[in-house]
């Protein structure tokens, strides 16, 4: 993912650095509103200062109040707002149509407090499930089908597009396009409980060939545990009953594994089949490496209080290290 570092960190999540057509239009709207609002505010303050100065002079000639009330209070706002409405309606025509037609479709489900991301493997037609990273091909229109499984969330990638609410029981849609490869940070934009602030994600735009290669790797089952340490880690995963909430394709669905999954609980936590390939854990809360993985497994409540993952008190240090190493290995 070498291309992924072309955007400076400060611009990862910024409305002031649009990197897609829709964001550029929204950026233009904001500047027009900001500059226009500032000019009008300064003019009104200047008039106010003038009026106060006049009021202090005894010999001041009377102003014509009706002219100011009708002119400044009705005619002027009506003109300004009509002009803004006309211009913004005309500009909005260029916003991407919110349709999945001829666009790669990705399903994103908002959960407390992370994002489930699902793709369809073009080869097998099977579902590929990931989390907290929306990988897209750069320069192409992508349609995100959005919903939520618990409360209302809102998906917002300021550098790429506007916000879209994610509502339980409904599917909303958002078209995204990143003009060039890069990483763009997004954030839940609708208060959704205790860890709303730590419900972030990244959109990673890759060149088409890199994207295809990425999707093919994601479609494959989990990498085998080929060392003793990794095998110990995998065994710890199953002993701890992590599969009650997390899926590792090729492991949790293997024969002989005690199936813990009741109804939809397998989707309670992120799919970990390729967790090692992700940049962050905890919905962009921590960088992803074995140290943070171990810290998270040992005590997620210390990092993100209120998450539904319980602490693993009974893991000894060696086993914890093996488990974290195993997860890091799942590229
Ligand atoms: Cu999800 Cu705020």
Image: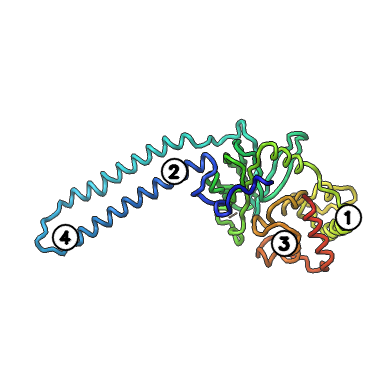
| Residue 188 on image: x %, y % | 58, 53
- N-terminal of the pair, mark 3 or mark 4, is 4
- N-terminal of the pair, mark 2 or mark 4, is 2
- N-terminal of the pair, mark 3 or mark 2, is 2
The one of 56 and 244 positioned closer to us in this rendering: 56
Residue named by callout 1: 227
Between circles 2 and 4, the one closer to the viewer is 2
* Identity of the residue furthest to the top in this view: 102
| Residue 123 on image: x %, y % | 76, 34
Marks 3 and 1 sit apart, C-alpha to C-alpha, by: 21 Å
Residue named by callout 3: 292
State which image quarter holds ligand 1: bottom right
Label 2 element class: helix
Residue plotted at (43% across, 44% down): 29
Q: Within 10 Å of the Cα at label 1, are there few (<14), some (14-19), or many (20+) other Cα atoms?
A: few
Left or right, 35 with respect to 323, comes to left
Q: Is mark 2 within 8 Å of ligand 1?
A: no
- N-terminal of the pair, mark 3 or mark 1, is 1
**Is residue 173 visible to us here?**
no
Label 4 element class: helix
| Residue 85 on image: x %, y % | 38, 40
| Residue 7 on image: x %, y % | 58, 48
Residue plotted at (73% across, 58% down): 289
Tell whether label 1 touches label 4 (CB within 8 Å): no
Marks 2 and 4 sit apart, C-alpha to C-alpha, by: 39 Å
């Amino acid at each position: 993912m070498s291309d992924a570092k072309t955007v400076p960190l400060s611009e990862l999540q910024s409305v002031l650095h649009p990197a897609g057509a829709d964001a550029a239009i929204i950026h233009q709207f904001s500047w027009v509103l900001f500059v226009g609002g500032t000019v009008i505010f300064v003019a009104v303050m200047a008039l106010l200062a003038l009026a106060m100065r006049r009021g202090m002079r005894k010999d001041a000639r009377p102003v014509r109040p009706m002219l100011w009330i009708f002119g400044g209070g009705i005619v002027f706002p009506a003109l300004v707002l009509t002009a803004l409405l006309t211009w913004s309606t005309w500009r909005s025509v260029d916003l991407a149509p919110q349709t999945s037609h001829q666009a790669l479709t990705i399903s994103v489900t908002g959960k407390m407090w992370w994002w489930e991301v699902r793709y369809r493997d073009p080869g097998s037609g099977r579902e590929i499930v990931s989390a907290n990273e929306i990988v897209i091909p750069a320069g192409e229109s992508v349609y995100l089908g959005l919903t939520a499984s618990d409360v209302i969330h809102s998906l917002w990638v300021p550098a790429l597009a506007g916000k879209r609410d994610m509502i339980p029981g409904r599917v909303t849609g958002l078209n995204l396009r990143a003009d060039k490869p890069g990483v763009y940070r997004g954030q839940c934009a609708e208060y959704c409980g205790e860890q709303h602030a730590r419900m972030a994600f990244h959109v990673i735009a890759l060149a088409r060939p890199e994207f295809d290669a990425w999707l093919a790797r994601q479609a494959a089952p989990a990498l085998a545990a080929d060392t003793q340490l990794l095998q110990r880690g995998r065994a710890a995963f199953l002993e701890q009953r992590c599969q009650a909430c997390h899926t590792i394709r090729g492991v949790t669905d293997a024969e002989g594994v005690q199936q813990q999954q009741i109804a939809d609980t397998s989707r309670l936590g992120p799919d970990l089949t390729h967790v090692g390939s992700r940049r962050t854990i905890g919905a962009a809360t921590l960088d992803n490496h074995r140290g943070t993985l171990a810290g998270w497994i040992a005590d997620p409540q210390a990092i993100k209080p209120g998450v539904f993952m319980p602490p693993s008190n009974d893991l000894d240090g060696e086993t914890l290290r093996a488990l974290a190493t195993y997860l890091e290995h799942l590229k």
